Amino acid sequence: MTELPNTALDVEALAAELGGTGRPVLWERLSWTEVAEEVAKTRAVIIPVGATEQHGAHLPLSVDTEIDTAVALVVSALTGVPVVPVIPYGVSASHGDFAGTLTLRPETMIAVMQDLIDSLYTSGVRQFVLLNGHIWNNGALDVSAEKLRVKYPDARVRAIGYVTMYPGPEVNGHVQFGRGLMHANYFETSVLLHLKPELVHMDRVTSHLDIDSFWDYRMDQVSETGVWGRDVEQASAEQGQIEFDRSVLTTARAIAAAIKEPSPDPRHRP
């Protein structure tokens, strides 16, 4: 049995409320007959999409994948919605020439998502949550969602980030400006200190002042260290737990409600 990521949430009580069992439903560990049984319950699935890319000298390349996977596992445990294996590669070329980054072209990501969604649809899934852990995946996932809506009229899809379900200004990233410019910053460092402290090297931390910018830039055009954000040295596991648990809880509540949401009737007139 997969051990749940570290959380202070009352998993048993929340699972009873939201439809789960307290254990994540791992797609890859089901037999084909068990898949049919699980799909029949909600006809829904969570597809976590991460990245393998530089996160400064103090964090591993897997930050986006680690956090997104952890959120997906607990959400699955709370809601009973199956979660498929994470996609560990993202649209990450905008990091420029920092070593280690593995990247897909947006077109490749869209093709991968389409093939994966087609497979899941064949297995009976009709509700798709594309759970994103890396902001530069947004465009490709939005296109993937649009292609799904057009191809399968009986399917429902939403691409979200793991913090999408609570207001951006509430995310404590020690960010000065409203666009939330951040990477390997106070927020991500805190959450990984909570989840995988052995992967964080606080003795290597650097900070970088975020600036208000109309344009989006490559990371190597705005930061010489791969970090984008202030006060990273103040990151803490305690703050990381607060942010992680809130991401899990708001996402789980949203998904639990979404899979029961009635479909609109186009014939309805006011």
Image: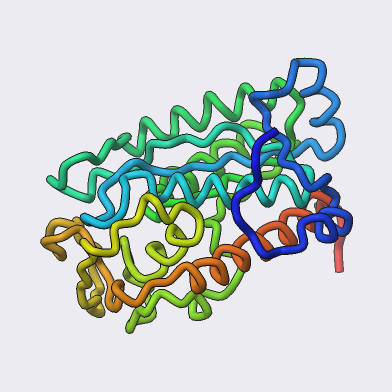
List x then y, in percent, for residue 114: 52, 29
Identify whether 26 is placed above or below 15: above
Instruction: Residue at 82% x, 40% y: name it.
Output: 42
Identify whether 106 is placed above or below 58: above
What quarter of the picture does the N terminus occupy? top right
Instruction: Residue at 75% x, 36% y: name it.
Output: 154
Left or right relative to 18: residue 186: left
Q: Nearer the viewer, residue 106 or 69?
A: 69
* Quadrant in which residue 186 is drawn: bottom left
Instruction: Residue at 56% x, 32% y: name it.
Output: 85
Q: Nearer the viewer, residue 126 or 70?
A: 70
Instruction: Residue at 52% x, 56% y: name it.
Output: 161
Left or right relative to 60: residue 144: right
Q: Nearer the viewer, residue 55 or 146?
A: 55
User: Can you name the residue that lies furthest to the bottom here?
Assistant: 176
List x then y, in percent, for residue 242: 57, 71
List x then y, in percent, for residue 194: 49, 61
How did the renderer colour the structure? rainbow
User: Can you name the residue that lies furthest to the top here?
Assistant: 32
What quarter of the picture does the C terminus occupy? bottom right
List x then y, in percent, for residue 240: 49, 67
Left or right relative to 55: residue 86: right
Identify whether 9 is placed above or below 67: below
* Quadrant in which residue 88 is drawn: top left
Q: Nearer the viewer, residue 200 or 244?
A: 200
